[in-house]
Amino acid sequence: MAGWGEAERASLSLVGTRGDGPSGAGAAGLGTAVVLADLERMTADEMEHVFLGVLGDPDAAEEVRLPSRPESAGVARRLVLSVLAAWNLHHLLEVGELLTGELVANAVRHAGGRMIGLKLVRRPGWLRIEVRDSSRALPCLIVAPETGRYQSGHGLRVVDELSDRWGADLLPRGKGVWFEMRTRDRTTAL
């Protein structure tokens, strides 16, 4: 994800930044390239309409870029619900929606950047949802030894308890925080 960060260049071929050249061909019928200012003016419904097709293609493995604002958590949750339903992963709808909301809320609250990325990847037996931001500060769970209970990071505690695994990766500019859940794909034979 080289170049990701405050340069605010979109990572999608569908959604380019003005000045990107031919790749900035427009977003799902918007007719012009989308820049941060455009995204910030879009309603949650407009963003969902623009980005659903990008996330819904399991072969594309693209990310969508959303403004780092509280409303983006709702957009991300609805996008995840729509994609999981399209992929017939109905048993993961509630958990996927909840955990996506937690990761987006953490990115909006703690990262300090202007954009966040959302990416869904499906491979045999697994679903991975990742939220990327421009901060290199990695999240962690802190367990107090005397009580064995979590002191802070309640959102991450939920991610830890409900996902099959989760983690964070440093990227060239920022980080990606992700969780994975097992799927009941019929294609996975043991």
Image (tube, helix red, strand yellow):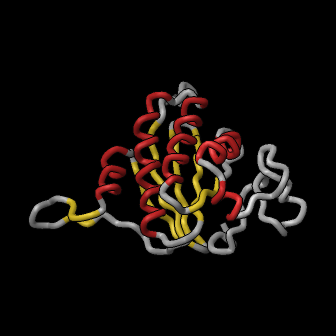
Task: Answer whether residue 58 is visible to the viewer in this image.
Answer: no
User: Who's the residue at 59% across and 36% down the image?
Assistant: 83
Rendering quarter of residue 48 = top right
At 10% from the left and 62% from the top, the residue drawn is 147
Please determine whether, in this image, residue 186 is positioned above or below residue 38: above
Tell me if residue 32 can be seen.
yes
- Horizontal placement of 36 versus 82: left or right? right
Q: Pick whichever, 168 or 77, lies toward us.
A: 77
Tell me which residue sits at (14%, 60%) in the image: 148
Q: Residue furthest left?
A: 146
Q: Is residue 161 above or below residue 82?
A: below
> Quadrant of the rendered structure where residue 98 is?
top left
Residue at x-position 40% and y-position 50%: 165
Query: Residue 174 at x, y = what percent?
Result: 55, 71
Residue 150 image offset from top left, x and y in percent: 21, 60
Q: Nearer the viewer, residue 43 or 169?
A: 43
Q: Viewer-proximal residue, 19 or 166?
A: 19
Question: Extreme right residue here?
Answer: 22
Position in image of residue 12 (x %, y %): 73, 55
